[in-house]
Each structure stands twice: as structure tokens, then as C-alpha cells.
Amino acid sequence: MFKDELTVRVKGGNGGHGVVAFIREPRKPKGGPAGGDGGKGGDVIIEADENYNTLYHLTHNLKWAAQSGEQGGGMNCSGKGGRDLVLRVPVGTIIRDVEKRAVLKDLEKHGERIILCRGGKGGKGNQHFATPTRQVPRIQTDGQFGEERHVRFELKLVADVGLVGMPNAGKSTLLSRLSAARPKIANYPFTTIIPNLGFLKLDDATSCVIADLPGLIEGAHQGKGLGDQFLRHTERTRIIVHLVDVSPEALKPPAEAYALIRTELESYSKTLGTKPEIVIATKCDLTGAKKGTKELQKACGSKPLEVSAVTGKGLKELVQAIFARLADRG
């Protein structure tokens, strides 16, 4: 199940307490202080892992805590430190502090990590408090509490190319033809309710990640339809491939559909509005599509690529255009 937002509480482990103890051996019946220190509490660490593409594996527990340190022992033995808790999240996860309303970290690379909550220091045993004038100290300190935070994880998928368009524009079908991804495909709006990722190859040395994002409707940037919960995934893409259904059965006329999606992208983010865009006219195999293609060309100000995922028309040209544009972007 896809999950791209999650709010949890995380806490570092508490430090173990120091102890009061004395040496009691046959030859040392009144030995000196020998109370050990408490162990340090474990840290809570968040690590980006490319093997995950959802936060769903963390939803079964909304409170995460590292292990606390153990209490010290006699004979100057220190308590065992608590184990660190490592929570793995998808690459592209943003971590926010809910109370401070601040971004703590944007995990953009595999293996990148942050210590979110440090464990408490262990307390000191009475061995540390012996002095020439206080040879039998009965003093120790307690371990410190671990740090605690209320945090929010927000996932923005990391993809080179984002497919956008009205519902039923043919994004999922196109993704299935360009890559080995197998998204759900059907002839009704909102077939895609979660983003799908595919791997697109030009040759053995050149490839990219392409994302099929759920269909947008008017007011999506305000949360209507599937809303801005998926628009944010487009922010990390390097280029946008804008699909417009030019067939007579389209939900909206091509010019209107193109203008609507452009408005939603620009309203959501200025960055999105300025991203490089490849406009393609989809379902060009259907009767009457030529008229829709001409309308789209007028609306976008340039000749769109004519594509049919069913017949394969224009797919080779689209792949070449995608990698050419990516090369321009560095």
C-alpha cells in the first residue's frame, strides 16, 4: 500500500542510572567505592533506503523509541548501552519537526542519514565521587532522558520524468509501453490512485526513472480530486511529459485540458511552472484525433509529439526527446 505522509513520535533511549556499590572481598572487607556508570541510551536514526518507495511499513507503530541504557553494576562495571533504532525511509523523504514547524532534513540520496533523537547519557556511579575527605561516598547520578520529537515524514518521489495530464489521458498505458512497470489500466478516470515508477532505458549506459502521477483535475492545487498530495511528487522531476488526450472521447477539449493542467502546476509551485515540458498528443490512433492535435498545437504554441501507446506510433521519437531534454538539463 502506498503511503507518502506519516506523523509519528520518536524518542531516544534513556540513560541508565549510576549505582552506589563498594568492594566487598575477603581481603578487602571495607574496600572503596565501586559503583559503575549507567549505559548511554540508543539514538533514533533515520536512513534513506532506495529499496523503499512508501512509508507504509512504518504505519503499524506511531511511537518509536530506541532502547534505554542499562543500570551500572558493582565492581566498577558500566551498564550496557542501548541499541540504536534505525528507521529506513524512501529516498526523497522530508523530515519536519511538527512543534517547531521546521524542516530537519531532506534525504535525497541512498544511505543518507540523520540522528533524529539522541539517547540520554548514563548516570555516574559512586566511584566518581570519592575524595580524600569523602572515602565512602553514597552518591550517584541518574541517567538522562533521551530526546523526544514529534515529526512528520513527507515523501516526494525521486524521478527524472513525471507524466502529468487529465484523468484517463493514457499515462499508465504509456508507462507500461515505455518500461517494465505494470500499473493498473482501465477505461475510466482515476485508474491511477498512487504514483507508479518505471525504468526507461535508451541503451546499456543511459537510463532514467519515469513516474506516472495520478490524474489532475481543476482545483487540484487546492486539494480537489486527488489534490496536492500527488502534485508535490512532480517537484523533484527534472522534466515533465504532459499528456493530452486528443480523441473525440476525451474528458475535455485538448486546448482546455492543456490550459487546465498548466494552471494547476503553476498555481501549486512556481518551480513546477518553469520545468521543461514535452507535450504529447495521446490516442492518435483514434478517428478524429487529427482535429484535436491541431487544437492542442494552437494552445501550447508548438507541435506536440503524436503518440499512440496502442499502436506504438511516436514512442521511439518520445524516448529520444526525453533523453535529449534530460541531457540539456545536465
Image (spheres, rainbow, N blue to C red):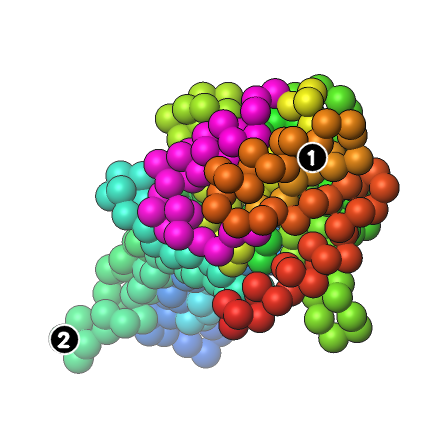
Q: Is residue 60 visible?
A: no
Is 31 displayed left or right of 293 in the figure? Answer: left
Q: Quadrant of the N terminus?
A: top right
- Residue 287, by quadrant, is top right
- Residue 24, by quadrant, is bottom left
Residue 250 rendering spot, x and y as whole percentages: 65, 23
In the image, is residue 84 above or below residue 217? Answer: below
Is 106 displayed left or right of 80 in the figure? Answer: left
Instruction: Name the residue rendered at 24%, 65% in the picture.
Output: 137
Residue 4 rendering spot, x and y as whole percentages: 53, 38
Magenta residue check for 263: yes
Residue numbers of the magenta segment: 251-278
Residue 144 rendering spot, x and y as whole percentages: 31, 54
- Amino acid of disc 1: Lys
Q: Is residue 77 visible?
A: yes
- Amino acid of disc 2: Thr
In-front residue for pair 264/123: 264
Task: Determine the secondary structure under disc 1.
Answer: helix
Residue 167 rendering spot, x and y as whole percentages: 61, 27
What residue is pinned by disc 1? Answer: 290
Pick whichever of labels 2 and 1 is earlier in the sequence: 2
Q: Residues within 10 Å of mark 2 (few under 14, many from 20)?
A: few
Magenta residue check for 312: no
Instruction: Name the residue rendered at 42%, 34% in the picture.
Output: 264
Q: Residues within 10 Å of mark 1 (few under 14, many from 20)?
A: some
What residue is pinned by disc 2? Answer: 133
Task: Determine the secondary structure under disc 2.
Answer: loop
In-front residue for pair 303/86: 303
Residue 191: assigned label: none
Is 243 displayed left or right of 28 in the figure? Answer: right
